[in-house]
Image (cartoon, rainbow, N blue to C red):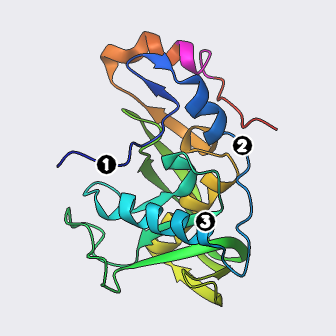
Amino acid sequence: MTTLKHATWTLWRDNSVTEEESKLLRRVADEVPIPLTDEARRDVETLIDAFLERDDAAGLAAPQIGISKRIVVFKTKNFGSETPPSRDSNDYEVLINPRITQYRGAEEQQTEGCLSCPEISADVTRWTEVKVRAFDRTGRKINRRYTGFPARVVQHELDHLEGMLIVDRADTLYFPREKKQFFETMFRLGRRPTPAP
């Protein structure tokens, strides 16, 4: 991976809690003004830039780069590829002020990782189909339906906008054996951290 221009905010780093970053990641993100202001457009473009420079992410939410706004970006295909989509491709989508309006299909458990929860993974149960109402990167109102893995990615990214992370939804958490003491302390021997009000 190349050097990143946009740092990813995390709950912990180097075996210690990141107080400022954790606080922002745990708060409910602010609505983006519609029609989009110049500042909102800059925030959208900054998030897209941060996403496109990564080769290890299916999606990214604005709070993960320190912008507490309701914006997410995610791949729509080529999920197994370690090559990020190009800026002018149709391989990714941006949602502004997204709201899930319907959950459908079955609930399914899969293992997820998260850039904001380094070194761990979690078994998380999510719906296999969701409908979303949002605005696109130009501020136009859209309705989308996602199924399968894209539905999982959308639910994961939208959780970030509510201050929720995989550690809050985990049925089971996995972490490196050599970090056992840190993570057991971090999660208070099995208690999951809960989002701040």
Residue at (31% x, 14% y) in the render: 178
Circle nearer the viewer, 3 or 2 = 3
Report x, y in % for residue 197. 82, 38
Q: Which residue is mark 3?
A: 39
Circle nearer the viewer, 1 or 2 = 1
Q: Farthest residue in the front direction?
A: 38
Residue at (56% x, 33% y) in the render: 21
Which of the numbered marks, if any, corresponds to residue 17? Answer: none
Magenta stretch holds residue 130: no
Q: Amino acid at mark 3?
A: Glu
Q: Amino acid at mark 1?
A: Lys
Cα distance, mark 3 to mark 2? 20 Å
CA neighbours of label 2 inside 10 A, class few (<14), some (14 to 19), many (20+): some
**From this viewpoint, is residue 36 visible?**
yes
**Drawn side of residue 98 relative to residue 76, left or right:** right
Cα distance, mark 3 to mark 1? 19 Å
- Stretch of the chain drawn in magenta: 185-190
Residue at (35% x, 57% y) in the render: 57
Which of the numbered marks, if any, corresponds to residue 5? Answer: 1
Looking at this view, is 164 or 34 the one in front? 34
**Drawn side of residue 187 relative to residue 6, left or right:** right
Magenta stretch holds residue 188: yes
Q: Earlier in the sequence, mark 1 or mark 2?
A: 1
Up-down relation of residue 169 to residue 13 (above or below): below
Mark 3 element type: helix
Q: Which residue is mark 2?
A: 27
Mark 2 element type: loop
Report x, y in % for residue 1. 17, 48
